[in-house]
Image (cartoon, grey):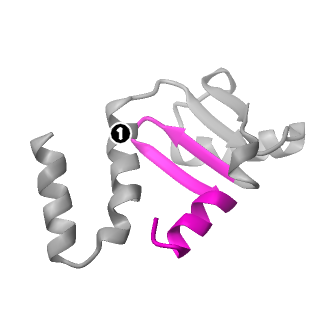
Amino acid sequence: MQAISRLKFALKKREEMHLYPRVLRNVIASLEYQENATVVSARELDKTTEADILKKLKKHFPEISKDDVRFKIDEKILGGIEISYRDFLFDGTVKGVLGKIMGK
């Protein structure tokens, strides 16, 4: 908890509190170390799109296989995708982008 308090203090000092939720999500993701990659989308993806995502993941993480990727649906993200794997988090969701724009 002390590290989180120091992080918050540092962001306040630099007047970058808008980054706090994003940084905190990344910290939590790294603490919840995942062996499997999770791809979240607002609707079911077709097999071609799933294969494209897997191909791009393999480019950055050569050790990943098709069995290591879990596809989930969460309508609350509105659109786009979110990918998490180990300490990597990509938030390309409509909800995430709007949150960044709004400073949340």
Residue at mark 1: 28
Q: Secondary structure at mark 1?
A: helix
Q: How many marks?
A: 1
The residue located at (88%, 37%) in the rendering is 47
Left or right of residue 37: residue 81 = right
Inspect this view and state whether residue 93 appears: no
Query: Residue 57, image x and y in percent?
Result: 61, 44
Residue 70: quadrant of the picture: top right
Residue placed furthest toward the top: 67
The residue located at (48%, 48%) in the rendering is 89
Kind of residue sitting beneath label 1: Ile
The residue located at (33%, 60%) in the rendering is 20
Between 19 and 92, the residue placed more toward the observer is: 19
Span of residues in magenta? 81-104
27 up-or-down from 31: above or below? below
Left or right of residue 50: residue 63 = left
Query: Residue 101, image x and y in percent?
Result: 54, 75
Query: Residue 92, image x and y in percent?
Result: 63, 58
- 95 falls in the magenta region: yes
Q: Residues within 10 Å of mark 1 (few under 14, many from 20)?
A: few
Q: Quadrant of the N terminus?
A: top left
Between 57 and 28, the residue placed more toward the observer is: 28
99 up-or-down from 44: above or below? below
Between 97 and 34, the residue placed more toward the observer is: 97
Query: Residue 68, image x and y in percent?
Result: 60, 24
